[in-house]
Structures are given as structure tokens and as C-alpha cells.
Image (cartoon, helix red, strand yellow):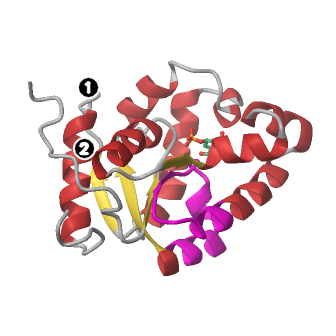
């Protein structure tokens, strides 16, 4: 069976928190869960943490409090999570656009941009209707605009990994583990 071809690393293999960045549909949550499993590390998702803190889901926060309040909560939640022991943190697509968040991530974690092409993002985000930004018009147009705005900033991440089309998440996890090892983000024995 090739599904988990990568040998799981020892517990606490991570020296620093791994922060996954990238656009909606890049696979941050799915890949992040599997990466955490492979590294024996906890997994966190900033959207889930914001929702838990607010007592409502992300679309409700946008609708009831507005995007600015969401961004404020996002920044605070990520700062708090960076104080936790090393873990894998999937962030919402807008999180790394915040300069203070980028600075905190740079100082305290290792960032991985999961880069994906437009067709992949459109296909993956069409499966769920829980992204308020994509409800404002044609999702493909919105995603293309966000790619133009955000990809130059995401490119500041420490590691860039191309997301595989067709949901080959395990291959992506293997490439991230190799890149983390090369970057010295894993314990030597891992
Ligand atoms: C957003 C991405 C979403 C969520 C919110 C805003 C963005 O997270 O934080 O809807 O600005 O790109 P995902 O990237 O996990 O979908």
C-alpha cells in the first residue's frame, strides 16, 4: 500500500510551528491534517479557532460583524497560536496578507505556501458554499483577482510547494516533509 509511503516521523519532530498559507481551495486544511499526522504533531486551523472564539461560523462572522472584525480576530488568534508548542497551522487565505501576521510568522514559525493554479482552486472551492468572499460574484473571476493580489505576497513564504491537481495530497505531504527537513525545521532523528 503506497498511501502512507512517507514514514511517520517521531513525535515532536517539529522544531517550529509550520504555517500553511495559500488561497481558498489550495488544500491547506486537508494537507495540513495529513502533514500533522505524518509528523506526529497537533493540527490547528485558524478559521476554526476564530469561529470557536466568536461562537459562530466564518460566514456568520462576515455577515454579522463584517470582514474587518474577522481580520482582527484572525490576527489575534494566529498570534496566540504561535505561542503554542510546535504544531501544523492551516491559516485562512487572507491571513498572510496582514503584515504583522507575516512578521510574527517569520519570527516564530516556518511558512509553507501551497501554490495552486486557478482551475484547481475553482474546482475545489465549488464543492462548498462556506466562503463569503466567493459569494460576491463569479468565483473564478474573484479567485483570479485574488491570485494577482496575493501570490506576490504568498511568495514571501519560506517554502513554496505546488499543490498537485487531482487531490494527490499524500505526494504533497511528502514534498513538504522533505522541504522542512532540508530547512532544518525537523529534529535530526525525524
Ligand atoms: C478567506 C479564506 C477563508 C476564510 C475566509 C476568508 C480569504 O479560509 O478565512 O472566508 O480571505 O481568502 P480558507 O482559505 O481556509 O478557505
Q: Residue furthest top?
A: 127
Query: Which residue is at a point 75% across and 41% down the rendered structure image?
Result: 52
Name which residue lies at 55% across and 51% down: 91
Residue visible at 28% across and 35% down? 169
Instruction: Determine whether, in the image, residue 189 is placed left or right of residue 113.
Output: left
Q: Which portion, as a residue range, is magenta?
A: 78-105
Q: Position of residue 112 (x, y in %)?
A: 38, 60
Q: Tell me the CA gap for discs 1 and 2.
A: 11 Å
Circle on res. 166: 1
**Quick check: 155 above or below 73?**
below
In magenta segment, residue 92: yes
Residue for badge 2: 172
The answer to whether 94 appears left or right of 35 in the picture is right
Residue beneath the point at 37% across and 50% down: 114
Secondary structure of residue under mark 1:
loop
List x then y, in percent, for residue 73.
Answer: 77, 56
Which x, y percent locates residue 127?
50, 18
Residue at the outermost left position: 1
Q: Badge 2: how crowded within 10 Å, few (<14), some, or many (20+)?
A: many
Amino acid at each position: 500500500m503506497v498511501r502512507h509511503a512517507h514514514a511517520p516521523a517521531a513525535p515532536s519532530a517539529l522544531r517550529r510551528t509550520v504555517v500553511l498559507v495559500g488561497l481558498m481551495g489550495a488544500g491547506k486544511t486537508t494537507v495540513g491534517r495529513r502533514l500533522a499526522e505524518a509528523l506526529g504533531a497537533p493540527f490547528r486551523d485558524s478559521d476554526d479557532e476564530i469561529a470557536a472564539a466568536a461562537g459562530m461560523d466564518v460566514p456568520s462572522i462576515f455577515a454579522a460583524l463584517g470582514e474587518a472584525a474577522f481580520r482582527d480576530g484572525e490576527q489575534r488568534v494566529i498570534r496566540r497560536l504561535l505561542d503554542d508548542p510546535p504544531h501544523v497551522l492551516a491559516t485562512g487565505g487572507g491571513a498572510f496578507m496582514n503584515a504583522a501576521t507575516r512578521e510574527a510568522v517569520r519570527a516564530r514559525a516556518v511558512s509553507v505556501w501551497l501554490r495552486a493554479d486557478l482551475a484547481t482552486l475553482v474546482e475545489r472551492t465549488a464543492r462548498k458554499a462556506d466562503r463569503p468572499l466567493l459569494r460576491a460574484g463569479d468565483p473564478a473571476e474573484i479567485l483570479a483577482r485574488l491570485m494577482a493580489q496575493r501570490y506576490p505576497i504568498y511568495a514571501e513564504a519560506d517554502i513554496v510547494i505546488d499543490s498537485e491537481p487531482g487531490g494527490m495530497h499524500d505526494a504533497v505531504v511528502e514534498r513538504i516533509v522533505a522541504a522542512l527537513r532540508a530547512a532544518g525545521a525537523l529534529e535530526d532523528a525525524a
